[in-house]
Amino acid sequence: MAIPSNPLSNPKVNIKTKLACFWASLMFLYIYADYFGLMTPGDLEDMMNLKTPMGPTTPGMLIGFSVLLIIPALMIMASVVLRPQWNKWLNIVVALLYAVISILIIIGDMGNEWKKFFVLYQFVELFVFGMIIWYAIKWPRTP
């Protein structure tokens, strides 16, 4: 098979689209990490018995967990619709806050044999947060 003489085009992707894609990727990472977490010994039973790593499940705790996942879900949309200045700083601040959460999870789960997969997810999430921060900091300026 002959290689075509004209190379494939590589269209420039808008910074807003890139940031939205990073946040969407994070949501998939969250979903799969939590799904696989249910396959570790005791986790499904704990969930059925209304236990969390932070204590007994309460309505307030469920609201807190919900907010924790609603924010990155909304960042997908916010990355596309917000004006550049707000967008840049919101992406940096939210990604930094969530990166701190990932670091705390890594510290808490590092010694648990069954949570090594979860630590792997956290490192991948840290990479994605780093990319969000990097692209937001390097936001292109108008000439």
Image (cartoon, helix red, strand yellow):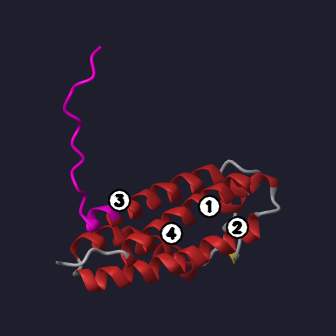
Chain part drawn in magenta: 1-18
Q: Position of residue 134 (x, y in %)?
A: 44, 71
The quarter of the picture where the C terminus appears is bottom left
The mark closer to the camera, 4 or 2, is 4
Q: In this view of the protein, which residue sits in the foreground, 69 or 75? A: 75
The quarter of the picture where the N terminus appears is top left
The verdict on residue 16 being magenta is yes
Residue 92 shows which numbered tag? none
Q: Position of residue 117 (x, y in %)?
A: 68, 52
Instruction: For mark 1, give the secondary structure.
Output: helix
Residue topped by disc 4: 130
Determine the CA span between mark 3 and mark 1. Answer: 18 Å
Residue at position x 24%, y 69% in the image:
80
Question: Which tag, 3 or 1, sits closer to the chain's start?
Answer: 3
Task: Describe residue 25's horizontal placement relative to residue 113 as left or right.
Answer: left
Residue topped by disc 1: 123
Question: Which tag, 1 or 4, sits closer to the chain's start?
Answer: 1
Q: In this view of the protein, which residue sits in the foreground, 91 or 104? A: 91
Q: Position of residue 118 (x, y in %)?
A: 66, 57
The verdict on residue 103 being magenta is no
Instruction: For mark 2, give the secondary structure.
Output: helix
Q: In this view of the protein, which residue sits in the foreground, 48 or 123? A: 123
Residue topped by disc 3: 21
